[in-house]
Image: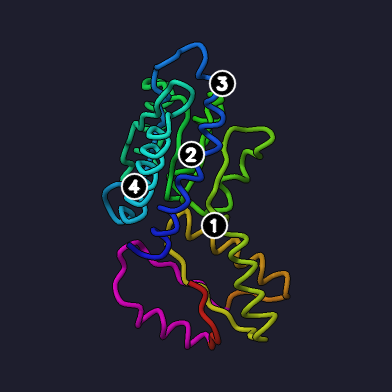
Amino acid sequence: MNQRSLLTWWLVPYALLPLTAHAQALAVPTQGKPVRVGLIAPLTGGSADFGSSVRLGAELAVKEINESGGLPGRPLELVVRGDTANPDKGRKLSEDLVLKDKVDFTVGFCNTGVAMKSLDVFRHNKHLLMVPCSQGTAVTAEFPPQHGFIFRVALPDHIDARFLINEIVVRRKIRKVAVFAGSTGHGEGGVKDLSAELAKNGLVPVTVIRRPLGAGPLAADMRKARAARAQALVV
C-alpha cells in the first residue's frame, strides 16, 4: 500500500461521519431498516490500489459504527460498486446507485475524470456525495457546496500546487520548472493548477510532458526536460 493509498484508507471513515450525521434524520420513521451507503471506487485496473484503500476504510468505518449501535436503531450497509477507473462505467454505476438501488447517500471516486462524468447525477437528484480520494480541484468547483450536494475530505490539488510552487519558486528561487502529468482528468487538472501558480510568479512551465497510465521508463522524458533546461520537476 503506497503513501496516498494509506492516507485514503485513513480518511474514508471521516467521509462517513458527516454522512451518518445526515442520515440521523432517516432513523425515526424506518426503525431497524439499514441505512444503505453507496460506495464507488476502482476495485480493479490501474487505480485498484486507491480503490481497495477506499473499500477497506469504508468497511472498517461501517464495522465500528455498527458495533457501537449504528445509527439510532439502524445499522449501516455498504453497497459496493467497482468503476475500473472508467468514466462511462462510473456514470452508469452512479445512476444505478441513485435511481435503482436508491441508496441513502454515496461515498465515491478516486479518479477525477470518473468523478467529473458523474457529478450531475448526484446534483440533479439531490443525492449527497462525499469524495474521499479524488484530489482534482474541479470536483468541488463545478457545484459549490452551498448550492449542491457534493463534498470532499480529500485535499484539492490547487492547495498542493500552491505549496509546491511556493517551495520551488519562492523559497528556492528556481525559475525553470518542468511538469510531468498523467494524460487523465486528474493530470490535466494538475497542469492547470500548477500553471496558474507559476503564472502568479510571472512564469510558465519550460515543458509539460503528459504520460499515459502504465507508461514505461522515464528516461526519454527526463532527457526532454533536461533539453528544456528544467531546474526542477513537478510530477
Query: Label 3 vs label 4: CA separation?
Result: 26 Å
Query: Label 1 vs label 3: CA separation?
Result: 36 Å
Question: Eyeballing the image, is 47 above or below 107?
Answer: below
Query: Label 4 vs label 2: CA separation?
Result: 13 Å
Residue holding disc 4: 56
Q: Residue 108: say if magenta.
A: no
Residue holding disc 1: 189
Residue holding disc 3: 25
For image coordinates 54% across by 24% down, the residue present is 24
Query: Counting other residues with Cα less than 10 Å from the Cα at mark 2, is it few (<14), some (14-19), or many (20 or more)?
Result: many
**Horizontal side of residue 70 vs 152, given as left or right:** left
- Compare marks 4 and 1 and give the one earlier in the sequence: 4
Please report contact status of discs 3 and 4: CB closer than 8 Å, yes or no: no
Query: Counting other residues with Cα less than 10 Å from the Cα at mark 1, is it few (<14), some (14-19), or many (20 or more)?
Result: many
Q: Residue 51 location, x and y as percent?
A: 35, 49
Query: Label 4 vs label 1: CA separation?
Result: 27 Å
Which residues fall within the magenta stretch? 206-228
**Horizontal side of residue 105 vs 41, given as left or right:** right
Residue holding disc 2: 16
**At numbered mark 4, what does the secondary structure look like: helix, strand or loop?**
helix
- Compare marks 4 and 2 and give the one earlier in the sequence: 2
- Compare marks 1 and 2 and give the one earlier in the sequence: 2
**At numbered mark 3, what does the secondary structure look like: helix, strand or loop?**
helix
Q: Residue 21 location, x and y as percent?
A: 56, 31
Indicate the quadrant where residue 107 lies: top left
Q: Please name which of the two marks, 4 or 1, marks the residue nearer to the observer.
A: 4
Q: Amino acid at mark 1?
A: Gly
Q: Residue 202 location, x and y as percent?
A: 73, 75
Query: Label 3 vs label 2: CA separation?
Result: 15 Å
Q: Nearer the viewer, residue 124 or 71?
A: 71
